[in-house]
């Protein structure tokens, strides 16, 4: 039997009659094991290069993981939920990726919502005002692997007049409504949409903090 080493040179390893059959089988199994080790090593290197970072916000009462190459999460409008009925943060996109994500939290009073469907209508009326807005589709989904959610996809022009697609995901927890808005260049969808799916699957709701301090009885 002749095998090739990695340089392509023939190796006269198993000639007829020189080795018992069980030795030959052991040799073939060993070579297969080496191939599996090389494959797993290469697969591990791929995982090491895809790094995630975790974002946690006590005001938004959320925690989630997202790819570190998306950009940095920065405070957006109304970030202090203890002083305002809603708050939001957003990812400042890298100049190369143009990926953007925003997370908003709303009370029932602010969105005049009695249900998740009401909140979806509230978000849609706001996003349909975008330049060259076009609705694509909508469906039900989940957030954090167990919280029911609604989502819809659309396209529009961003502030740089670049055509992008957007995915709005809306969910509710503890009588509060949450919006996860994700935008990306159309050609990047195949790569970044699964990443966004993993991000919202990782979302956790933190315990709500009671920001009302105790007061004397005469102040009630």
Image (cartoon, rainbow, N blue to C red):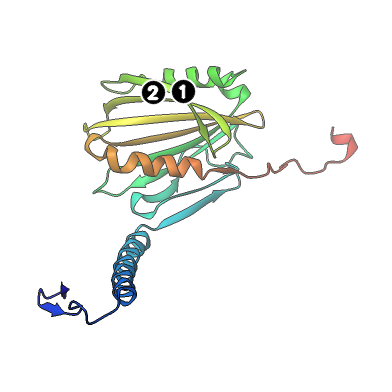
When asked about the image quadrant of residue 84, the answer is: top right
Local crowd at mark 1 within 10 Å, few (<14), some, or many (≥20)?
A: some
For the C terminus, give its image quadrant.
top right
Q: Is residue 84 above or below residue 44?
A: above
Q: Residue at x 37, y 41 (%)?
A: 194
Q: Residue at x 30, y 30 (%)?
A: 165
Give the image location of residue 74, x and y in percent. Answer: 43, 48
Dots 2, 1 in contact, CB < 8 A: yes
Q: Residue 177, can we see it?
A: no
Q: Secondary structure at mark 2?
A: helix
Residue 123's disc number: 1
Q: Is residue 21 left or right of residue 216?
A: left
Q: Is residue 84 above or below residue 92?
A: above
Q: Is residue 78 above or below residue 49?
A: above
Q: Whole-Å distance between the Cαs marked 2 and 1?
A: 6 Å
Q: Is residue 119 left or right of residue 161?
A: right
Residue 127's disc number: 2
In this orientation, which residue lies closer to the viewer: 121 or 129? 121
When asked about the image quadrant of residue 131, the answer is: top left
When asked about the image quadrant of residue 1, the answer is: bottom left
């Amino acid at each position: 039997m002749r095998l090739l080493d990695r340089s392509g040179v023939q190796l006269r390893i198993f000639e007829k009659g020189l080795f018992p059959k069980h030795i030959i089988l052991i040799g073939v199994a060993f070579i297969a094991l080496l191939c599996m080790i090389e494959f797993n090593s290469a697969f591990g290197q791929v995982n090491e290069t895809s790094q995630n970072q975790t974002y946690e916000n006590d005001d938004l009462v959320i925690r989630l993981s997202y790819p570190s190459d998306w950009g940095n999460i920065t405070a957006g409008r109304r970030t202090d939920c203890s002083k305002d009925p809603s708050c939001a943060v957003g990812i400042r996109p890298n100049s190369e990726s143009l990926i953007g994500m925003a997370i908003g939290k709303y009370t029932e009073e602010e969105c005049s919502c009695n249900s998740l469907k009401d909140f979806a209508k509230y978000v849609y009326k706001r996003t349909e005002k975008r330049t060259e807005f076009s609705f694509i589709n909508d469906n039900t989904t989940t957030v954090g692997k167990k919280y029911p959610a609604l989502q819809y996809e659309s396209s529009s022009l961003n502030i740089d007049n670049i055509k992008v697609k957007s995915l709005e995901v809306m969910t509710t927890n503890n009588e509060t409504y949450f919006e996860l808005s994700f935008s990306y260049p159309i050609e990047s969808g195949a790569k970044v949409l699964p990443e966004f799916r993993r991000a919202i699957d990782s979302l956790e709701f933190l315990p709500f903090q009671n920001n009302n301090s105790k007061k004397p009885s005469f102040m009630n």
